[in-house]
Image (spheres, helix red, strand yellow):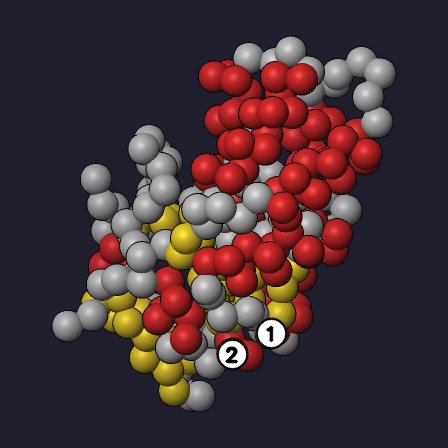
Amino acid sequence: MHHAPDRLFERAYDAFLFDMDGTLLNSIAAAERVWSRWALKHGLNLETFLPTMHGKRGIDTISALNLPGIDVVKEALDIERGEIEDLEGIVPIPGAIAFLNSLPAERWAIVTSAPSALARARIGAAGLPQPLKIVTAEDVKIGKPDPAGYRLGAERLGVDPSRCLVFEDVLAGVRAGEAAGADVAVITATHTHPLETSHPTISSYEHLRVEFTSEQGLRIRPAE
Protein backbone atom coordinates (compact mmCIF):
# COMPACT_ATOMS: atom_id res chain seq x y z
CA MET A 1 0.00 0.00 0.00
CA HIS A 2 1.41 3.39 -0.94
CA HIS A 3 0.79 5.99 1.72
CA ALA A 4 0.09 9.37 0.25
CA PRO A 5 3.25 9.95 -1.76
CA ASP A 6 1.46 13.18 -2.77
CA ARG A 7 2.54 14.57 0.59
CA LEU A 8 6.09 14.34 -0.69
CA PHE A 9 5.29 16.90 -3.38
CA GLU A 10 3.91 19.56 -1.04
CA ARG A 11 7.03 20.91 0.60
CA ALA A 12 10.35 22.35 -0.47
CA TYR A 13 13.44 21.26 1.46
CA ASP A 14 16.89 22.71 2.05
CA ALA A 15 18.52 19.27 1.80
CA PHE A 16 17.96 15.54 1.50
CA LEU A 17 19.55 13.05 3.93
CA PHE A 18 19.76 9.43 2.77
CA ASP A 19 20.31 6.23 4.66
CA MET A 20 22.46 3.91 2.54
CA ASP A 21 21.74 0.17 2.87
CA GLY A 22 18.22 -0.61 1.66
CA THR A 23 17.58 3.03 0.81
CA LEU A 24 20.11 3.88 -1.95
CA LEU A 25 21.57 0.43 -2.57
CA ASN A 26 20.67 -3.18 -1.89
CA SER A 27 23.35 -5.01 0.09
CA ILE A 28 21.10 -7.57 1.76
CA ALA A 29 22.66 -10.61 0.05
CA ALA A 30 26.22 -9.66 1.04
CA ALA A 31 25.29 -8.56 4.56
CA GLU A 32 23.33 -11.73 5.22
CA ARG A 33 26.15 -13.95 3.91
CA VAL A 34 28.67 -12.35 6.26
CA TRP A 35 26.38 -12.11 9.29
CA SER A 36 25.06 -15.67 8.78
CA ARG A 37 28.58 -17.11 9.03
CA TRP A 38 29.17 -15.10 12.20
CA ALA A 39 25.80 -15.99 13.74
CA LEU A 40 26.20 -19.72 13.10
CA LYS A 41 29.65 -19.62 14.70
CA HIS A 42 28.01 -18.19 17.82
CA GLY A 43 25.11 -20.65 17.81
CA LEU A 44 22.41 -18.10 16.98
CA ASN A 45 19.15 -18.93 15.22
CA LEU A 46 19.41 -17.32 11.76
CA GLU A 47 15.67 -16.93 11.25
CA THR A 48 15.24 -14.88 14.39
CA PHE A 49 18.61 -13.12 14.28
CA LEU A 50 19.01 -11.92 10.66
CA PRO A 51 15.96 -9.60 10.57
CA THR A 52 17.30 -7.76 13.64
CA MET A 53 20.61 -6.61 12.23
CA HIS A 54 19.57 -4.35 9.34
CA GLY A 55 19.97 -0.61 9.69
CA LYS A 56 21.92 -0.61 12.95
CA ARG A 57 25.63 -0.33 13.68
CA GLY A 58 27.31 -3.75 13.84
CA ILE A 59 28.69 -2.91 17.25
CA ASP A 60 25.15 -2.15 18.54
CA THR A 61 23.75 -5.37 17.07
CA ILE A 62 26.48 -7.45 18.72
CA SER A 63 26.28 -5.60 22.06
CA ALA A 64 22.52 -6.15 22.26
CA LEU A 65 23.01 -9.94 22.13
CA ASN A 66 24.91 -9.98 25.44
CA LEU A 67 26.96 -12.99 24.34
CA PRO A 68 29.26 -14.16 27.13
CA GLY A 69 33.02 -13.81 26.76
CA ILE A 70 33.26 -11.98 23.43
CA ASP A 71 35.12 -8.81 22.55
CA VAL A 72 32.38 -6.73 20.93
CA VAL A 73 34.76 -4.28 19.24
CA LYS A 74 36.89 -7.05 17.74
CA GLU A 75 33.84 -8.99 16.52
CA ALA A 76 32.40 -5.84 14.89
CA LEU A 77 35.73 -5.24 13.11
CA ASP A 78 35.76 -8.85 11.86
CA ILE A 79 32.27 -8.38 10.44
CA GLU A 80 33.27 -5.09 8.83
CA ARG A 81 36.29 -6.71 7.17
CA GLY A 82 34.08 -9.53 5.87
CA GLU A 83 31.58 -7.03 4.47
CA ILE A 84 34.26 -4.93 2.75
CA GLU A 85 35.59 -8.10 1.08
CA ASP A 86 32.13 -9.24 -0.05
CA LEU A 87 30.67 -6.70 -2.49
CA GLU A 88 29.05 -9.37 -4.65
CA GLY A 89 25.54 -8.51 -5.79
CA ILE A 90 25.46 -4.96 -4.40
CA VAL A 91 23.17 -2.96 -6.68
CA PRO A 92 21.60 0.50 -6.68
CA ILE A 93 17.92 0.87 -5.83
CA PRO A 94 16.17 1.47 -9.19
CA GLY A 95 16.49 5.13 -10.23
CA ALA A 96 18.81 6.07 -7.34
CA ILE A 97 21.85 6.97 -9.49
CA ALA A 98 19.92 9.38 -11.71
CA PHE A 99 18.06 10.82 -8.71
CA LEU A 100 21.28 11.56 -6.79
CA ASN A 101 22.98 12.93 -9.90
CA SER A 102 20.10 15.39 -10.33
CA LEU A 103 20.71 16.91 -6.87
CA PRO A 104 23.16 19.76 -6.22
CA ALA A 105 26.12 18.05 -4.47
CA GLU A 106 26.03 20.40 -1.48
CA ARG A 107 22.33 19.68 -0.85
CA TRP A 108 22.47 15.98 0.03
CA ALA A 109 24.35 13.69 2.37
CA ILE A 110 24.41 10.04 3.38
CA VAL A 111 23.83 9.10 7.03
CA THR A 112 24.66 5.42 7.47
CA SER A 113 25.14 2.95 10.30
CA ALA A 114 27.96 1.38 8.27
CA PRO A 115 31.59 2.17 9.07
CA SER A 116 33.28 4.62 6.70
CA ALA A 117 35.44 2.17 4.71
CA LEU A 118 32.49 -0.16 4.16
CA ALA A 119 30.18 2.70 3.18
CA ARG A 120 32.61 4.00 0.54
CA ALA A 121 33.18 0.47 -0.80
CA ARG A 122 29.47 -0.24 -1.15
CA ILE A 123 28.68 3.16 -2.71
CA GLY A 124 31.41 2.43 -5.28
CA ALA A 125 30.21 -1.14 -5.90
CA ALA A 126 26.66 0.09 -6.53
CA GLY A 127 27.88 2.79 -8.95
CA LEU A 128 26.35 5.63 -6.93
CA PRO A 129 27.97 9.07 -6.85
CA GLN A 130 30.13 9.50 -3.74
CA PRO A 131 28.56 12.14 -1.48
CA LEU A 132 30.46 15.30 -0.53
CA LYS A 133 29.25 14.78 3.04
CA ILE A 134 28.77 11.45 4.79
CA VAL A 135 28.06 10.50 8.40
CA THR A 136 29.17 6.97 9.28
CA ALA A 137 29.26 4.66 12.31
CA GLU A 138 32.48 6.27 13.56
CA ASP A 139 30.95 9.77 13.65
CA VAL A 140 28.35 9.12 16.34
CA LYS A 141 28.57 7.75 19.87
CA ILE A 142 25.04 6.37 19.68
CA GLY A 143 23.62 4.82 16.50
CA LYS A 144 20.10 4.94 15.07
CA PRO A 145 17.32 5.17 16.37
CA ASP A 146 19.17 7.99 18.14
CA PRO A 147 18.90 11.18 15.99
CA ALA A 148 22.59 12.17 16.39
CA GLY A 149 23.52 11.00 12.88
CA TYR A 150 20.79 12.92 11.09
CA ARG A 151 21.44 16.03 13.17
CA LEU A 152 25.12 15.81 12.25
CA GLY A 153 24.29 15.26 8.56
CA ALA A 154 22.17 18.42 8.53
CA GLU A 155 24.88 20.35 10.39
CA ARG A 156 27.54 19.29 7.88
CA LEU A 157 25.36 20.62 5.07
CA GLY A 158 24.73 23.82 7.04
CA VAL A 159 20.97 23.34 7.22
CA ASP A 160 18.36 22.84 9.92
CA PRO A 161 17.14 19.23 10.31
CA SER A 162 13.53 20.47 10.24
CA ARG A 163 14.19 21.69 6.67
CA CYS A 164 15.42 18.26 5.57
CA LEU A 165 13.77 15.21 4.09
CA VAL A 166 15.18 11.91 5.36
CA PHE A 167 15.00 8.80 3.14
CA GLU A 168 14.93 5.57 5.15
CA ASP A 169 13.90 1.93 4.91
CA VAL A 170 13.91 0.53 8.46
CA LEU A 171 12.23 1.48 11.71
CA ALA A 172 15.43 2.41 13.59
CA GLY A 173 16.22 4.93 10.85
CA VAL A 174 12.69 6.30 10.57
CA ARG A 175 12.70 6.91 14.34
CA ALA A 176 16.07 8.66 14.08
CA GLY A 177 14.77 10.96 11.32
CA GLU A 178 11.61 11.77 13.28
CA ALA A 179 13.57 12.50 16.46
CA ALA A 180 15.88 14.83 14.50
CA GLY A 181 12.79 16.83 13.50
CA ALA A 182 12.99 16.00 9.79
CA ASP A 183 10.28 14.83 7.42
CA VAL A 184 10.69 11.17 6.45
CA ALA A 185 10.05 9.23 3.25
CA VAL A 186 10.14 5.43 3.41
CA ILE A 187 11.69 3.39 0.59
CA THR A 188 10.07 -0.03 0.24
CA ALA A 189 12.24 -1.42 -2.59
CA THR A 190 14.20 -4.04 -0.63
CA HIS A 191 11.65 -5.23 1.89
CA THR A 192 9.17 -8.03 1.44
CA HIS A 193 7.34 -6.77 4.55
CA PRO A 194 7.30 -2.98 4.24
CA LEU A 195 7.14 -0.90 7.41
CA GLU A 196 3.84 -0.08 8.98
CA THR A 197 4.23 3.66 8.60
CA SER A 198 2.24 6.85 8.35
CA HIS A 199 5.06 8.46 6.34
CA PRO A 200 4.89 8.71 2.55
CA THR A 201 6.29 5.56 0.93
CA ILE A 202 7.99 5.14 -2.43
CA SER A 203 8.91 1.87 -4.08
CA SER A 204 11.89 3.31 -6.00
CA TYR A 205 13.24 6.59 -7.37
CA GLU A 206 12.27 5.81 -10.95
CA HIS A 207 9.10 7.88 -11.02
CA LEU A 208 10.47 10.88 -9.18
CA ARG A 209 12.33 13.97 -10.30
CA VAL A 210 13.68 17.00 -8.46
CA GLU A 211 13.19 20.69 -9.09
CA PHE A 212 15.74 22.98 -7.53
CA THR A 213 15.98 26.74 -7.22
CA SER A 214 18.21 28.52 -4.73
CA GLU A 215 15.23 30.52 -3.41
CA GLN A 216 12.79 27.61 -3.18
CA GLY A 217 15.12 24.72 -2.38
CA LEU A 218 14.51 21.12 -3.43
CA ARG A 219 11.10 19.90 -4.50
CA ILE A 220 10.22 16.34 -5.42
CA ARG A 221 7.89 15.96 -8.40
CA PRO A 222 6.36 12.94 -10.06
CA ALA A 223 8.34 12.22 -13.24
CA GLU A 224 6.35 12.78 -16.40
Residue at x-position 65% and y-position 59%: 135
Residue 82 visible somewhere in the drawing: yes
Which one is nearer the viewer's eye here, 41 or 7? Answer: 41
Indicate the quadrant where residue 165 lies.
bottom left
Say what amino acid the circle numbered 2 marks.
Ala
Label 2 Cα crowd, 10 Å radius (few <14 / some 14-19 / many 20+): some
Is disc 1 placed on a helix, strand or loop?
Answer: loop
Q: Could you tell whether 208 is left or right of 153 in the image?
A: left
Position of residue 121 measured from the top left corner of the image (x, y, whole percent)? 60, 57
Q: Is there a contact, CB below 8 Å, between mark 2 and mark 1?
A: yes
Q: Is the residue 79 above or below the residue 176 in the image?
A: above
Q: Is residue 76 above or below residue 16?
A: above
Whether residue 193 sits left or right of residue 63 in the image: it is: left
Quadrant (top left, top right, bottom left, bottom right) of the C terminus:
bottom left
Residue 181, relative to residue 141: is it above or below? Answer: below
**Which residue is located at x 44 percent, y 46 percent?**
89
Kindly tell me whether residue 8 is visible in this rendering.
Answer: no
> Residue most toward the bottom?
214
The mark found on residue 105 in the picture is 2
The residue nearer to you, when weighing 119 against 221, is 119
Residue identifier under label 1 = 132
Gap between marks 2 and 1, in whole Å? 6 Å
Quarter of the picture containing the N terminus is top left
Mark identifier at residue 223:
none
Disc 2 is placed on an element classified as: helix
Asked if residue 147 lies left or right of residue 11, the reply is right
Residue 117 screen position, x and y as percent: 68, 56
Q: Earlier in the sequence, mark 2 or mark 1?
A: 2
Name the amino acid, label 1. Leu
